[in-house]
Amino acid sequence: MFPENGIFNLEKHSKTQQIIFVSLLIFCLTGIITPPIALLLGLLVANISGHPWLHLNHKIIHVLLQVSVVGLGFGMNVSNALLSGKEGFLLTVATLFSTILLGTLLGKWFKTDKKTSHLISCGTAICGGSAIAAITPVIKSDEKQTSVALGVIFILNSIALFLFPAIGHWLSLSQEDFGLWCALAIHDTSSVVGAANKYGSTALQIATTVKLARALWIIPVVLLTSFLFKNKTSKIKIPYFIGLFILAMVLNTYVPQLTTVTPYIVAVAKIGLTVTLFFIGSGLSSSVLLAVGIKPLIQGILLWGFIASLSLIAILYLN
């Protein structure tokens, strides 16, 4: 009797989880709520009712983010994108390599695991989870090392989504300056686009372009990592979706016949981004947060503070 009752209660709980999750997912698909609120709903699901399909979460986030970013390309102009990329190039190089160097020094100071430290540093310097995914096979990190690094990045990404727009308005940053700052100082593309979208359309265009240009630095950083960790056999995972993003921009700029449909594509892409952030939040349960540990988290916070402060000062006084 008791085992049967236990199985019944388990199935009932599972169905309740699924109903709550699907209901909130549909709510995110309506386009009514903003990306930060979607992230918050995901966090509530992760820590109250639970994610019924957690094993699929990483794959869903990966695909949704890439499709959404390509869709946003249909709302951008090639000449404006080139200008944005040119303005952010020197800042990208300066912040990228100084962040990796500082991360290495902090890792030694805190005596953080070497591979975990390198993953956090590269994730902060380039593009969050995508950089970690590219570097993981190169350094042959285990599941715990990778999970800790991803946990640090996703926690700070979640905070950035709420914090950066508030700071931007407090400092009265222009959309151009805010978009550039987002691209340089927020780890993951999803949170960069989410924060910039909340700030304005110009900020969104600049942030997306500079961030994706920054993501291409995965290639030289992976090569450098292979040298440092003495691993010459691993293949480099190139973010091919960036090519589709560029193609979308080209089509939007030079094929005027598409102007009747591109606003709808961009609108769907923004909804896709909102849903992506809901899935990211739903993967950040209390067990994930506790597994991170205090030293890697402090290292991640200090690195984040460094790159955010350095890039903001450069934008305000040197740009």
Image (tube, helix red, strand yellow):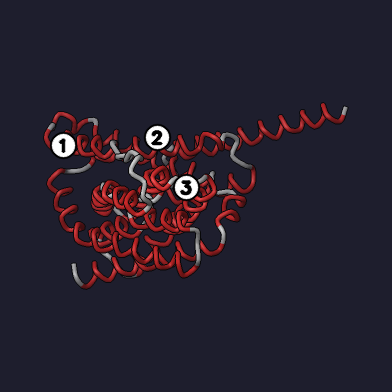
- Which of the two discs, 1 and 2, sits closer to the camera? 2
Q: Which residue is mark 3?
A: 141
**Residue type pointed to by label 1:** Val
Q: Which residue is mark 2?
A: 63
> At 34% across and 69% down in the image, what residue appears?
309
Instruction: Describe residue 63's horizontal placement relative to residue 19 as left or right.
Output: left
Q: Residues within 10 Å of mark 2 (few under 14, many from 20)?
A: few
Q: Is residue 11 above or below residue 230?
A: above
Which sits in the foreground, 156 or 275? 156
> At 60% across and 55% down in the image, what residue appears?
290
Q: Which residue is mark 1?
A: 250
Distance from the alpha carbon under mark 1 to that under mark 2: 22 Å
Which element type, helix, strand or loop, lies under badge 1?
A: helix
Residue 201 visible in the displayed image: no
Distance from the alpha carbon under mark 3 to that under mark 2: 23 Å
Q: Quadrant of the N terminus?
A: top right
Residue 60: image quadrant is: top left
The x, y position of residue 192, in whole percent, is 35, 52
In the rendered structure, which disc, 1 or 2, sits on the residue that comes first in sequence? 2
Q: Is residue 140 above or below residue 17?
A: below
Instruction: Describe residue 202's horizontal placement relative to residue 160 as left or right.
Output: left
Q: Residues within 10 Å of mark 3 (few under 14, many from 20)?
A: some
Which element type, helix, strand or loop, lies under badge 2?
A: helix
Which sits in the foreground, 108 or 7? 108
Distance from the alpha carbon under mark 3 to that under mark 1: 38 Å
Q: Quadrant of the C terminus?
A: bottom left
Residue 24 visible in the displayed image: yes
Residue 99: image quadrant is: bottom left
**Residue type pointed to by label 2:** Val
Q: Is residue 70 above or below residue 216?
A: above
